[in-house]
Amino acid sequence: MSAPTRGTRYITVIVSLLAGAAVWEVAGHLTTEAFWAPLSATLQSLAEFARGGVLLRQAENSFRLYLSGLALAIVTGAPVGMLLARVRWLRVALENYIMMLYATPMVALIPFILSMMGFGFAPKVLVVFLFAVFPVLYNTVEGARSIRPELIEVAHSFRSNEWRLWCDVLIPYTLPFMMTGVRQAIARGLVGMVAAEFFLSPSGLGQMIMMGSQNFDTAGMLAAILIIVLLGVGLMDLGRFLENRFAAWRGYNR
Amino acid sequence: MSNQVRQAQPRIAMSGAGKRYGALQVFRDVDLTVGEREVLAIIGPSGCGKTTLLRCIDGLIPLTEGELTVEGEHITGPREGVAMVFQHFGLFPWKTVFQNVAYGLKLAGASRAEIEEKIPEFIKLVGLSGFEHYYPYQISGGMQQRCGLARALAVQPRVLLMDEPFGAVDAQTREILQFEMLRIWEMRPTTMVFVTHAIDEAVLMGDRVLVLKGRPSSVHEIVEVDLPRPRDRATLLHPRFAELREHVWNTLMAEARQAEFEVTR
């Protein structure tokens, strides 16, 4: 069998998506509205939300929370990861805590965060941050540590100081690993966002899902979920694109 | 004559030098001098500490015993005017050939204009013109080491340290690079310390060949290579070349053979 061409690939993808949509639609009609809504009803709900401005407002709400937490995770995770990779005693001192926190299901910490910080915006950002920061941190540390010692020796041999060593060698080498972490953080942060919106004060897309569920408005609930899914897929693609871009020099990774 | 010049103004001088890692003594009692336009080849079995010795001269690691001066000054760290070519090339894979070659010069604070002007010259010197914008993974091992060589030459070093530079390339490429190196050295003669485990290469490159041997290793013998320069492929056919190679071979292999015989007996 010959390898599939680009054209047949696209056709396969489109047919697969259409089949999925058809199954969704049919499943909706075979069950009650409260249990599963057909795709058409879901899209209708979505259109209503969009028209009423609810969708935009709630999505913006969620997005602000998500991006704040994610940005905070990247700007702390990446530099702290680099530092841990470079400063041995710091790494030895902290790596157990990092592993423990990485392994902890973050949802378990939400009641604690609630009692500590209440219902504001900050505790929600903290939840997204906690979901997202460890993949960035972990991948950065492991990546930065995997550099061949010879390359650092080359830098020393050419009389590089520590600052130049970071700029010329450590950071460019670590970037692709960091981006792998960011890509994972993008996915985990989304989970964190919904969790924060569920378990702290309800808001954003999470609130829409909850309200839909409570009011037996399955179509509305699915509409909100669909938005989150599309957001997730789009962001993952962006993450993969960035990762490949920063890793082009490896000469593989395609 | 050359001997006098050498002794009068050694670029590199080591006396009673030793290096120890905890309980492991790598080498000891190393005395050597290298003159201004001299190539000292260092040969020894793998694991004898030749690379360690070279890294000490580069200032990457300190000696634990003895004295080391380069241009009359004690070595406390990597020094301006000394450059190293690494065994596994040590190229930065995220930098292009041009950026790799420019690395040392850029660190030394050269302006953009200066880099734009000088780097092509060194890329040309090593025969990499046309490959400026390739990444290391896109070029062969031999070309990668040409790039490593250009990077070292670009800082216009007065001391060039070669750490088994052709050890990681295939046999034919290795021969080509050896003659390239000889050609380049004739154009820009500097003090050179050339570490290798290949006997032919040591004799071909060196004005003297220092044989490092034993555990911990020490200077076993220094062989004067009285082959005329410039050297090229014809040098390999010189009867004296065969004699010297045989001599170094015997010096180096005597113990190894003995050990082998003891095992078989």
Image: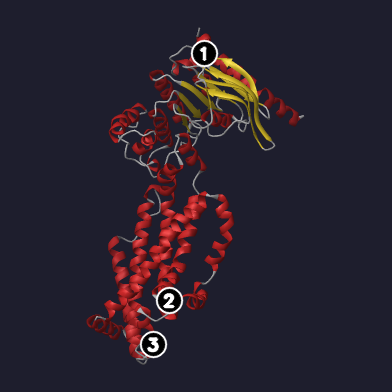
Residue under circle 2?
Answer: A196
Residue furthest top as drawn: B1
Q: Left or right of A246: which side holds B237?
A: right
Residue under circle 3?
Answer: A213
The residue tagged with tag 1: helix, strand or loop?
Answer: helix
Alpha carbon distance from label 2 to label 3: 17 Å
Q: Is residue B121 above or below residue B1?
A: below
Residues at circles 2 and 3 in contact by the CB criterion of under 8 Å: no
The residue tagged with tag 2: helix, strand or loop?
Answer: helix
Image quadrant of residue A99?
bottom right
* In front: label 1 or label 2: 2
Sequence-wise first label, 2 or 3: 2
Which three-letter amino acid code belongs to the residue tagged 1?
A: Arg
Parent chain of label 3: A
Q: Position of residue B30 (x, y in %)?
A: 62, 23
* In front: label 2 or label 3: 2
Residue found 49% across the figure and 32% down from its top:
B78
Which three-letter amino acid code belongs to the residue tagged 2?
A: Ala
Which three-letter amino acid code belongs to the residue tagged 3?
A: Ser
Q: Left or right of A103: which side holds B30?
A: right
The residue tagged with tag 3: helix, strand or loop?
Answer: helix
Residue furthest left as drawn: A51
